[in-house]
Image: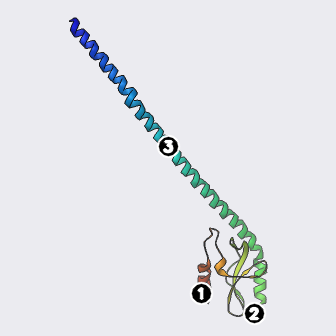
Amino acid sequence: MDKALRNTIIAGIIIIALSVGYYLVIFIPKKEATRIEEQKQQQTIREEQQKQDQLIKEEKSKADEWFVKNNECQKYKTQVEEKQNGILGAKVLSGVFYSSKTNSCLYVALDFDDEFRIRDASTDQLIFHENIKDMKGNQVGDEINNLIEKNK
């Protein structure tokens, strides 16, 4: 009996040693690696969310700035209409709008010589439509060409 008890105790110690070894050598490192990977993924998600939030904030800021400037341009509306009414046959084709490319208030008009003109609302200086961009920096020449074609 003594021998059987001794073998049982040795087997129990071996099983416990293997269990502790497995826990320390395999389970804990895997658990730690999984935790570190999850932290990296969460950090990546946070960074991407911050980038998206920053982009949204910048776009909103640009849109707000454009909206404010576009509203400021409306002070030229009456002035532009009066100028155009003073020229025989002139027709304003668009309202006064803000151009971020030229950083000025512009309008499109059909002048007395049946030519379409894009002019600066404050100075009445001629501006070429290829130079005009919208608030996102995209060319709007095609849109103005469509407006011109539509009103011919």
Residue kind at label 1, given as amino acid type: Glu
Query: At which x and y percent is residue 84?
Result: 75, 86
On the image, which quarter does residue 59 sit in? bottom right
Q: Residue at x 78, y 77 (%)?
A: 122
Q: Are marks 2 and 1 in contact (CB under 8 Å)?
A: no
Q: Which residue is mark 1?
A: 149
Say which of 148 and 49 sits in front: 49
Query: At which x and y percent is residue 6?
Result: 25, 9
Local SS, label 3? helix
Q: Nearer the viewer, mark 3 or mark 1?
A: 3
Using residue 40 as the reference point, say whether residue 15 is left or right of it. left
Q: Nearer the viewer, mark 3 or mark 2?
A: 3
Q: Which residue is mark 2?
A: 88
Say which of 57 and 38 sits in front: 38
Residue kind at label 3, given as amino acid type: Lys
Using residue 105 as the reference point, say whether residue 56 is left or right of it. left
Work out which residue is located at the far top of the displayed protein and give it.
Answer: 2
Q: Which residue is mark 3?
A: 40
Quadrant where the image shows the C terminus: bottom right
Chain-order first, disc 3 or disc 2: 3
Query: At which x and y percent is residue 116?
Result: 67, 87
Query: At which x and y percent is residue 114?
Result: 68, 92
Task: Examine the rendered structure and indicate whether residue 100 appears above or below residue 110.
Answer: above
